[in-house]
Structures are given as structure tokens and as C-alpha cells.
Amino acid sequence: MKRFLLIISFTIAGYSVFAQNNIDSLPSSTVKKDWSKEQLSGRSADHFMLQLGYNGWSGETDSIRTKGLSRTFNIYFMFDFPFKSNPHFSAAAGVGLGTDNMFFKETTIELREYPLTFDHDTSISYKKYKLATGFLEVPVELRYAANPMNFNKSFKVALGMKVGTMVDAHTKAKVTSDRSRNGGYTVKVKDRRNFNSTRLAATLRVGYGVFSVFGTYQINPFVKEGYGPNIRPYSIGLCISGL
């Protein structure tokens, strides 16, 4: 989690310096532009966002043994509403789908047990073992764009929140060898009873043009209180946006 916060902090600082240099280099007539004469409807303003990144957990216990590059994939369709007094700023809201895949080693997750358990199990050999979750989400952002006429050619920052409802939670295991020394098959278990059905997460994006770095942190617990460890998922990655 500390590494995640450091990366986000250095990214924001670097882009802020870059943005300030760009603004300072503009002539005063451009900075004080009369936006009331501009037609902002129909402009490119990040109406579509595609995000791919690393997924991690804050609050892991010793029994939780993650493995490899866990990942997150999100897709959103957004509506952007510029402020009439200052179109550099705008509010945006939309809808989309967020998915997380967390990979484990020497671990069996008992989704259908109460409380939720992460068993350190060496009696079964897995080629791959993951916990996959999916959320239908509503993201909301407060945005700043140096060039509000075209987000695709602008430095931009967006701070926001997203609220999601869980639509899927399952484990998927590719078994190499089980307790009976059989293998070469896949086991999938679906169950959402131990997880919070609602996800509330803080979001941040910083970038230029169609590319930006994004970060998220879940504010409420991932697992229901009393049903398992106090896990708070977070993610960091690359966002491609446009339209």
C-alpha cells in the first residue's frame, strides 16, 4: 500500500510541474480566453474510458498468499458537464463494469464457509488459482483540463468516487494434482455471501492526451464485517480514454 501511495504521489507531482510549465508558457490572451464564445458541446471529453492495471489488497493476513501479477480491468461510458464559469473544470458521471482477478499460491479459498477462510493447502497442487469479482459501477469525477476544447490534446486531472454493486464472485482453480493424485481439470465455485455487495472506492487519474495513470482505493471493507479479514482492495494502472 505504501508503494502504491508513493507512485501516485510522484506521478501527480511530475504532471503538476509539467502542466504549470505549459500554462506559464501560454500568452496571457490565451489564458484569459472568453469561453462564452466557444461551443463546448460535441467536443472530445473522455466519454469512454478503458483501464488495465495491477490489483492489490491492503489488510492481508499471514494466511493469504498472493501470487504473480493480479490485475484489474474496467470499462466506463461517461457524460461530461463543464462548469459555465470556468470550463477548465467539469463534473462527469457514467456507468460501467469493473473486474478484479486476484491470484494465489498454495491457497484454497472456502467461499461457501462462514467465516470466509484462506487455507494454506499444500496437499493440492494448482497450476493457477484465482478469485474473480465483477461490479456494475457508477463513477463520478471532478475534472480539470488545461485544454477543455479537446481532452485528447490536454493535460488533465480527475478526482472522484465510484459506487458499485457486486454481480459476480467466484474462484477458478486449474488442478494439477489433488489429494487422490488426479489432475488436469478445472474447478469453479461461485458464491457472494461473504462479500459486501456494495463497493465504494476513491479514484484518481492524471495524464496527458488519451493516456493517463489511474489509482483506486476501496473505502469500505471488501469482506463483510465479521465474515473474514478486513481487506481493502486497491489498484494502479493505465487508462486509455477518448471520444
Image: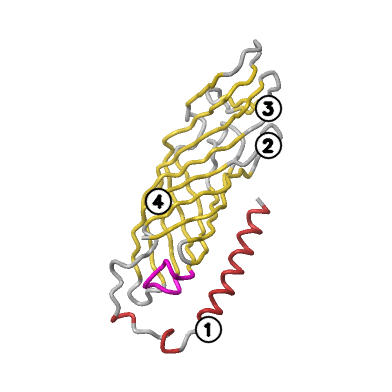
Alpha carbon separation for disc pair 2 and 3? 15 Å
Of the image marks 1 and 2, the number of the one nearer the N terminus: 1
The region drawn magenta spans 145-155
Alpha carbon separation for disc pair 3 and 1? 55 Å
State the residue at coordinates (50%, 29%).
170
Question: Mark 2 highlights which residue?
Answer: 61
Question: How far from the left and from the top, in percent, is residue 216?
Answer: 53, 52
> Which is more foreground, mark 2 or mark 3?
3
Question: Mark 1 highlights which residue?
Answer: 24
Q: Amino acid at mark 4?
A: Tyr
Question: Mark 4 highlights which residue?
Answer: 76
Whether 239 is drawn above or below 19: the answer is above
Which corner quadrant of the image does residue 106 belong to?
A: top right
Q: Badge 3 local density, few (<14 within 10 Å), some, or many (20+)?
A: some
- Looking at the rendered structure, the secondary structure element under dot 4 is strand
Q: Badge 4 local density, few (<14 within 10 Å), some, or many (20+)?
A: many
- Looking at the rendered structure, the secondary structure element under dot 2 is loop
